[in-house]
Amino acid sequence: MTIRVGGTGIWSGQLRRGDAGEAAALAAELEGLGYSTLWIPDAGGDLFTAIGNLLGATTTATIASGILNVWMHTPEQAASEHARLVAEYGPRFLCGLGVSHRPFIDSVNEPGTYKKPIETMSVYLDGLDAAPIPLVVEDRVIAALGPKMLHLARTRTAGTHPYLVTPELTNAARVGVGPDALVASEQGAVLETDATKAREIARLHLKTYLGFPNYLNNWKRQGFTDDDIADGGSDRLVDALVVWGDEATIAARVQEQRDAGADHVCIQVLTKDPRAFPAEQWRTLAPAVI
């Protein structure tokens, strides 16, 4: 890869959608704490300004999209913006790509927009290859879950960014992309030792995702059932997807992800207020997970 991604990172919607000045200041602090990569999501809108804001605030950290939604940005735009940001800040922008989810895409576009995800991603990669300044294989990964998308990640990108996965599913991703590709797994975490409070926060986070078939199918591959998915998720499912407890407990899950095949683990810290920057939790966790 042009970009080397290892160690432990942070996955944060707040760094994308929160106050830009506060996001920049925290990005610099997170880099100083030793977090190697900062991941931000995309649900449309101006993703690239947010990436530029974080690149400008840091000097060594990789900034990654987790993920750039291929229905909401043309490959020409993605390649052009990637080239612009790399020219300005150096090779620190890893472009995570994803096909998102039918219920979401069809709700913000004409019903029926979402179709043929494997073909759509393949054509999108063709567009990145054909751009005046290509967004090259080494600088892109796919948020792949199923075997076919993992094969595409293996053959046409640097690897995969699995989201909402257990260590067992991280291992499936490793098998799918092979021994040499990047596996950068997201791990939800609640720094809370009270089971009731922690699971309440985790379920608030999982609520939307429980309606997305891509995730449900992936969890069922591991053996979770419709009963696990019903009523906000069983304790078994919640605890498998979102680790909660003290610093040592969260660090142990991060290590499980590494042992399962992850080169890089990006922690998404969850709190009662999903809009607030979990800055204190990021600081508290750093010595344990880095």
Image (cartoon, rainbow, N blue to C red):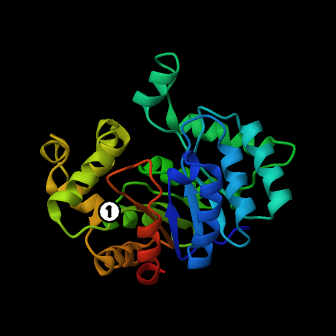
* Crowd tier of the residue under label 1, counting other residues whose Cα lies within 10 Å: few below 14, some 14–19, many 20 or above: many
Picture quadrant where residue 187 is located? bottom left
Query: Which residue: 55% across, 48% down?
Result: 18
Q: Can residue 67 be seen from the camera position used here?
A: no
Q: Can residue 33 be seen from the camera position used here?
A: yes
Question: Residue 288 appears at what percent x and percent y?
Answer: 41, 82
Q: Which residue is mark 1?
A: 166
Question: Residue 160 appears at what percent x and percent y?
Answer: 53, 58
Query: Which residue: 32% across, 62% down?
Result: 166
Furthest-left residue in this view? 227
Question: Residue 27 appears at what percent x and percent y?
Answer: 61, 64
Q: Secondary structure at mark 1?
A: loop
Picture quadrant where residue 138 is located? bottom right
Question: Residue 233 appears at what percent x and percent y?
Answer: 19, 47
Quadrant placement of the N terminus: bottom right
Nearest the eye: 18 or 134: 18
Picture quadrant where residue 24 is located? bottom right
Nearest the eye: 154 or 62: 62
Considering only vertical position in the picture, is 52 above or below 73?
A: below
